[in-house]
Image (cartoon, rainbow, N blue to C red):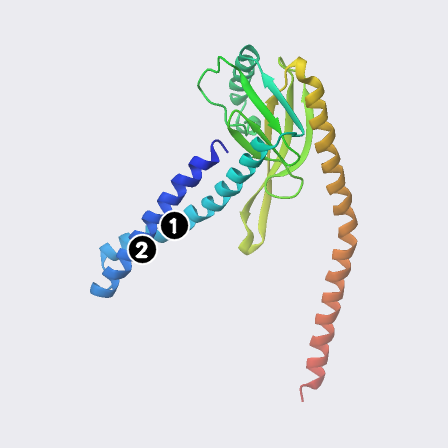
Amino acid sequence: MRYPLRWFAVCTAVALLCAVAVQRGAQEFDRAGETGLALALLVPGLAIGVVALIWIVISARAAIGQARLMADPDPLARWHVPAADWDRFRAAEREQSTLGPARHNDLSISGKARPQGVGVIAGTRAILVDGSFHWLSPRGNPTLRNLAWRATSPPTLEFELHYLRGSPSIGVMSPRAAYLRIPVPEASRAQGARVVEHYRALVRQAETRSRARWPRIRALLLLGLLVFTGGMIAAMMLVP
């Protein structure tokens, strides 16, 4: 997310406007019943307001994470991408975008030139690149699944992320793969290697915990099934 504090301010303003619209719509409904004006205020106000509230939470969390990362005097890694390397990276990403949405970079790349280059700050759970903030966690949405070096000029770190899409209310959720690519100049290769080592360890740890958790989940499901079946049998036996 680029500039999450701005997103927070915009979403808060939209939510307040929606609250005013809903209030006016409710007053109109009380006065004249189900009129076109009442519905025009209530329905969009409620729908857009709910979405705005969700984005308020998302952007507020990102803004807090970005502020903490920027204030950290000793982050996991920090490096500078010179202007020439940044321009080559942007050109390479434009070519990648022509290959289709599957190769889209999650990084929000500004269209403006950066004569002074771009700063990168990597934390233990997030990364900040030129104002674009991203959570990196093997648990959450998106879920970090892997990362690797790409032999480009400049070298690039590619994080493989999985987003869950669908409707949790009906139990249909499917993962969508996405990629976050970040340039690492040759002079900062050691900093990039530190990031790779840290996040690969996080992914391995999450996979180990997941494998250890599945036997317990299966046992609980089996126990639940046995209790349910036993209850049904007992209920049938008690019926005269």
Q: Secondary structure at mark 2?
A: helix
Residue 41: image location, x then y, percent: 28, 53
In the foreground, 24 or 35: 24
User: Label 2 is placed on what type of residue?
Assistant: Val
Front-lying residue, 27 or 226: 27
In this figure, which residue is indicated by the disc labeled 2?
22
Looking at the image, which residue sits at the far left?
32
From what the image shows, is residue 162 above or below residue 194? below
Disc 2: CA contacts within 10 A as few (<14), some (14-19) or many (>=20): many
**Location of residue 17 in the rendering, given as x and y in whole percent from the top left corner:** 32, 47
Q: Relative to 17, does residue 184 appear above or below in the rendering?
A: above
Which residue is located at x 57 percent, y 36 percent?
A: 68
Label 1 – label 2 distance at C-alpha = 9 Å
* Tag of residue 79: none
Q: Residue at x 74, y 61 (%)?
A: 220
State the SS at label 1: helix
Residue 3: percent from the left, percent from the top?
A: 47, 32
Q: At 78% from the left edge and 60% from the top edge, which residue is drawn?
A: 219
Residue 64 seen in this snapshot: yes
- The answer to the question of whether label 1 and label 2 lie on touching residues, with beta carbons closer than 8 A, is yes
Left or right of 150 on screen, residue 208: right
Identify the residue at horizontal 65%, vertical 16% (top origin): 155
Q: Quadrant of the C terminus?
A: bottom right
Task: Classify residue 239 by image quadrant.
Answer: bottom right
User: Relative to the observer, which residue lies in front, 97 or 126?
Assistant: 126
Q: Is residue 158 above or below residue 9?
A: above
Residue 157: x, y in percent? 65, 23
Of all residues, the one furthest to the top in this rendering is: 84
> Which residue was labeled with disc 1?
49
Q: Is 30 placed left or right of 81 in the picture? A: left
Q: Amino acid at mark 1?
A: Gly
